[in-house]
Structures are given as structure tokens and as C-alpha cells.
Amino acid sequence: MRALQFCVFVIAYLVAGTASGQLDGFYVEKRQIFYQDQTSGISMPKHGAFLDYYFSRTGNTDILQASFSANFSNVPIQFRDTGQYRGFVAFEDVNALEAVYKDIFYYEFTTQLLGELPKNANVRFTSTGWYSGANPRVSNFAQLSTINAPFNFNLSLTQSAIGSAGVGWQNYIQLTVIDPVALSGVHVSQYAGTSNTLQIPGGTLGNSREYVARIQFISPDTWSEVGTFNDYRVVSQYSNETWVKLRTLGSYPDFLAELTRYYHWKQTSPSPSEPLADKDYLLARIPTAQNPNVAAASLLQLDVRKGYALEKLPDDKNDETLFAYELRDEELDNFVSGLLSVGLRYSAGNTRAEMVNWDLNPATNTPLITNWEAAQAIAPDLDFALMVNVPNNMVGTSLATTLTFYDQDGAVVTTIEETHATASSIAVEIPATALAENTQYDATLTLTASNGVTNGIDLQVAHVVDFSVETSLSNWLGVASAAIYRGTYFANGNTDTPDVLSSVRVRLTQDSADSLTAASVLEGETVKTTLTPQASDPLLMQSLLFYADEPTALSDFPYETYLFQTTIDNLSQSVPYDFALQAEAAPVITVETSHLLNSLDPSLPIPLSWTGIDASADNVSIEVVNSADPQTPIALENIAPDGLSGEIPANTFAVNSSYSLMIFFRRDLQNNYDDALQATLIHGDEYFTFIPVTTGIASYAGWLSLYLDAGQLADPAYTALTANPDGDTLTNLQEYAFNGHPLAPTTPPQVQADGGLYKLKFQFRSDNPLLSYQAEQSTTLDPPFAPFNGNTQVTAGSPYQTVQLTFVSAERLFVRLITRFGQTAE
């Protein structure tokens, strides 16, 4: 029976090495787990039934792999514990176990030793025995807490194992006494199935110590010889076991250990939080203040015979925790709620062990920040309540909350624990001035609930939510800035007299995700204009009013105080605006428009250039709108460093269409921060003119479609003028101009010697009026290059013409061919 005794120790260790060894036997065991914490009766933990499978070995065996499968399934259950070569499957009760692993099933072990091929051993569960009512129960339970260690002590059972679980087979009883701190067996003995008394010899246990005892009723099948394994054997068996706590005489300091199951979440939107399973863990913790004399601590998971020594923390690591251990990843995956023990050993030599049945129900709903939108624009000068719903496995418990804010470097900014809770939700109060203005923070909210204290263990469940919040510069209903601009028309050489010669624009920008539901400008009780939402970034609400002349605009919006009134969720607020600054003298602005009526390619950017106002200045911005829809802005792109040119984005307009556009040059004249609750108030001038635009075919888009698939056509890395998806020396613009291929390397035009002359021949696109080339030459490569001064020969073609440049003879020649698009592209 030596091998059988070895396999049921709580903790078994293997010695690594390469020497040969033997595998003695394979076990498939169906177990019921009970525990006894009162004089009469025993109870089953939540996960109280197990299929336990393992094997024993002799010698110094190196196991390369080991697995177990049921009914020759193709998906084996891997061994979890390399120290014991065992695995397990947990069930709520015996009926659930038998529903999956029936007696008639075949079970198969696969192992591979060092230097050998994999081998298989199988067993059929053939026992006719059953669990019946043969469960170990100690009848002298009251004496277990006052054992006199120097003398023999007998555990008396209310019944033996015979005549029940395995009628007709050789039943036996095994007693294992375990040190819960060292996580090892201190005594193992076996008894006949008819025994009612189990003896612990005197001197086996220490004085003033606590232990846990495992009593097993075991009903093994007969050993089955496995031919492919030579003399190796397989056995199937039933066992009913009960765990009880033993205490020898002496005093024990009180303590309160904590066992907390953490669920981790991440919230990035109003939607339910995303689970972060890789951050979940089970924390065993021994607080320092309550246990200053604890010398060692452990967590023992009795139902799967797995133990963890708790780590002693340095004094400078955590001034509140003496011992702690976190179960993560595979250790957490293998953890099942049920029968647990926390063990302590004090510096005086005595020990204490607490056993508990922890039936933890997982949450079916996640903790969720319900006022998510508001939390993305917190006004730091006001108190703010972060609202969170309570997961169902915390409802009815005493909740504790911790809200910690971190800066972008990960440093803690502040920690808040002020909480107001109802049955289903909590409000964490963030006090005014706790956070800085206009700042983004990473935040962690931890909800902790106690499931009650049982046998010295405070069983808790905690949910951790990671999220981000931002603070706003304004508490004026999320408004970042408000402005009134007075607009002046400039003719720009257009001989037609427009109907519009002046304008007034009222504009709001928002710094909050809560969209303004209404906004208007009032003069006293009179509404001057109602602002409408704009689809741009940042979100805008604005109104653009046109007038036949400036006196009419001034009459409608004189220089006086107005009220900006904004509304969010039926909450309105008004802010006074003192429009007291007169417009500055209008600059002389000229916009180049000669190229805008030549059938422009709408799939390419449309270049604009101007003189008279510098858009590189901080207080000047430019906007283009379709005069048929002046409320919808088109922001120019690629403003030149000198502020005198930019581009209407590609694909803004339809093909073969004509438009009358308005270009606005907007200038901020003064910022006023008074009486505006930190929102920026702007007085400004605008200057605008009308420009005609006519589009033709989308030749650039058509050229790309010859070579790119649908996915590539949607990717700017393939379609942008400056893109170079094939990695050659030419950009898309140059490939398009010189009849190249965007996805295949193209050789640039080469200078060829011909009878004492140099010639450069290439194809160039002729159907785009904004596309041009310029040739320059040099004999030294030192700047400046000289303009081309030779002969040009052009052969017509559609869409590519053939160009041949013949250069004046020289001893050596360097040629630079420049591609230009519009006014600035090169």
C-alpha cells in the first residue's frame, strides 16, 4: 500500500533529475467533499464533488508530458499541478459529476517519460458501489478543540465505511493530519473499513497548535493490468471525505484575515464595461496591525489539495499588510469556491487555522459609470458625483469605494472615498478643486463588499473599473468659447455687385461631450438669433446672418451688451457679452481665381492663394462655404508657412458641377474672460468674397482605380498625393503626372546623349490644368540651377502627351525635372 499512501498526501514534491524511474499506478477517483464545523451534521461545499485523476511514481522519473481524457475524447484535460501529476474537475454535487463522468466510461492516461515514446493506459469505471450515506463524521467533535498533544487522541466516527460505498470490495479508511502553515502532512494512517476509531499517536502534534484533519472513506476497484505499460496498473475508486479542524491545548491570539475576489473591468464608453480577465485575482491578506506577531501564513484550498504560502511583505512596501498572496492566471483558473483554510503561525510557536465554505456567486451585470458623458467634461470648480450601478453580487452588502486619479505619468493625484449609496447605485463625490483644469486623468474605481466574517476570515468581493476622465476649462454648460464676428465684403475684381455686402456671425465652441441642445443670443428679452448645430470638430453651434450693407448690420447688432443663452438637458444658463469694440479697417485682400473655372479635378485638392492677410498669424483662420449652404464650413488644409495659400480638401465637390463659394478670413481682435465663467469671449472681424468653381472629371481617382482594389482606395497610405506605396523614388503625384504605376516601381525619365546633344523624353498628363512641370539644368550641381533653355517638342496624346527636351550641348549636364500641382505642390 506504499504507493497508495503517497498519492493522498496534501502536498507531494518531486525531485528533478534525469535518472530513470517507474510509474506505479494510475488513479481515477470520484470524490465527495464534506466539512464539519459543529457537533452534529456535516455540510458539502458549493463545489463538493470532484473527478480527481493522478498517478504515482517511484525512482527519479522525468515526465515530459501527461494528460487525461474521458471516453477517448480528442480534447484531453491537462494536468494542472506538476508537483503531484494530478488534475481535477469540480462539480456542484455528485449528480452533476455522474451526469458527465458515468461509471461505464473509459478513461485514458497519456504519459511520456524522458527518452521514451508516449504511452497510453486506460481504465473503465466498473465499480457497482455508490456514495450512499457513508460519510465520515466525528462524534466526539467537542473534544477536537482541547487535544492534549503528548497523549494519544482518538477520533470517534458515527459510522464505518463498510457496507455502503463499495459493497463487495475492499473498503478502507485513511486519516491525514495536515499542518496548514507548512502545507504538509504530519500524520497518515490507514484503517479497515469496519473501524470507528482513528488514533493520532501522542507526540505527533505540537502544543498550542491547530491542524486540519482529512478523513477518507475509500472504495477502490481491483487493479487493472495494462499490457502496453508492462506491469503498470490502473484503478478507479470512490471516496467520501470530511475535513475538520483540530486544536491542541494553549491560547491563540485573535486575528482577522481577508480573502477578496477581484474582478477587473475597463470602461471606454457608455456601453457595458469590458472584462479584463488577465487582471482578475484572488487576494489573501493578513493586516499588520491586528497580527504583529505572525511569523508565517498560508492559504489552503482543501477540496483540490492545493496550498499557497503567503508572502511576508517588507515594511516599506505596505504599512498595512503583513502577509499577502495573489492568485492569478492559471492558479486563479484552477481555483474553485468552497472549502478554504487560512493558517497562521505566530512567533511564539502556536498556530491557528480557520476553515470556511465560501459560496461566491459571480456577478451577472458589470459595474458601470452611468453618467459617462458628464464624466468626460468635469468642471473642476464644482462638486461632481460619479454615478455607478452596483453589480448584483454586491447588492445588500456594506460597500466601500476608493476612487483614485492618476496623471499621465502614472503618479497618484488624489484618492477619494466619500460615497453615498442606495440599493442599486452609488455616488462617489469628487469635491471641487480636487482636480486641475483642462486635464485628462486615468482613474481607477474599486468597489469592495464584505460577504461577512466566518471563522476569522473576512470574505469579500471587489470590482475594479479603469476609465479616463477629463476636466473642462468652462462650467458654462460645456462652452469653451463664444464669439461675435462682423463681416465685410471685398470685391476681389468681380464686376458683379453681390446682394450681400456685410454679415454678422455668432459662434459657440464646446469642450464637452454633452451636446448643446439649444443656444441663442438675446438683447434683453428679445432673441436676436438662434444658433444651429454644426457637424465639425470641435462641435459648433453658430448662426451666420447676411445684410445688404454695413449700416443695416450695425442697426441689427449695435455695439452693446448681449446675452448668450445655452441649454443642455433642459438646464439653461445666460452669460453677458459686451460687444463694445468697433471693427478695424479692412485690409486689401486679393484671391487668385483664374484657375478655378478650368474643369478642376474634384478628386484632387483645389489650391487657393491670396494676398493681403496672413493666415499664419495666431488670430487668423480661413473657412470656405458653399454659398447655397453658408452654415456648413469647409476648413482649408495645408495652409502654407507664409499663410498665403491653402487647399480645399479633395472630394469636397461633385464631378462636372459648378459652385459659387464664399471664402472667409476671420480675425480675432480681443479676448474677454470677464463674467464668462472661464469661457473665452471673442470680438472679431471677418472679410469675405465670392469665388466661382467648376469641376470636371475625377481623373486622379480614375487613375488610382486602374491599379488599386477597394480596400486600398479607402486607405490614404495608398491614395494621397504624397504617398509612395511601391517605395520607389516617385510619389503618387509624380506617378500620375508621368504615366507611372502606384504599386510597381517606375524608373524616372533619363537624360540620353544623342549625337553630341542631350535629350530628355517623357510622358506627361495633359488633361489637368493644375498639373505642370519645370525643367532646370546645371553643369556643376551647385545652386542655383538655370532654367531650361533648349528646344521642346510635344506630341499630342490623351491623357498623356509625349514631351522631348533637347538641351544645348555641354561637356556635362545635370537636369532637374520639377512636378508642380496648383500653386505650391512640388
Image (cartoon, rainbow, N blue to C red):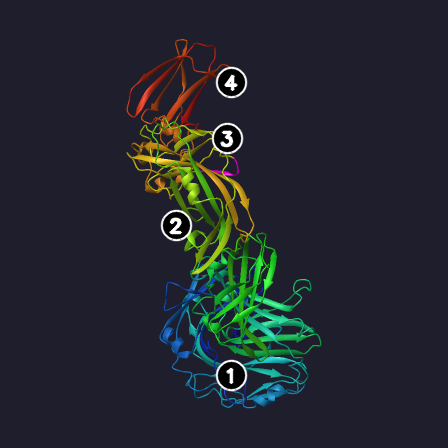
Could you tell me if the residues under marks 3 and 1 are in contact, i.e. CB atoms within 8 Å? no
Please state the horizontal and vertical placement of residue 7, each as a whole percent of the image. 52, 73
Please state the horizontal and vertical placement of residue 599, each as a whole percent of the image. 31, 29
Q: Name the one closer to the observer, 754 or 721.
A: 721
- First in sequence: mark 4 vs mark 1: 1
Q: Determine the CA span between mark 2 and mark 3.
A: 34 Å
- First in sequence: mark 2 vs mark 1: 1
* Magenta stretch encompasses residue 49: no
Q: Residue at x 65, y 71 (%)?
A: 296
Please give the range of residues in magenta.
617-622
Q: Determine the CA span between mark 3 and mark 4.
A: 22 Å
To which residue does mark 2 refer?
532
Q: Determine the CA span between mark 4 and mark 2.
A: 54 Å
Please state the horizontal and vertical placement of residue 724, each as a whole percent of the image. 42, 34
To which residue does mark 1 refer?
173
| Residue 671 in which image quadrant | top right
To which residue does mark 3 refer?
642
Q: Name the one closer to the observer, 818 or 591.
A: 591
Query: Which one is in front in this view, the residue at disc 3 or the one at disc 4?
Result: 3
Query: Which one is in front in this view, the residue at disc 2 or the one at disc 1?
Result: 2
To which residue does mark 4 refer?
784
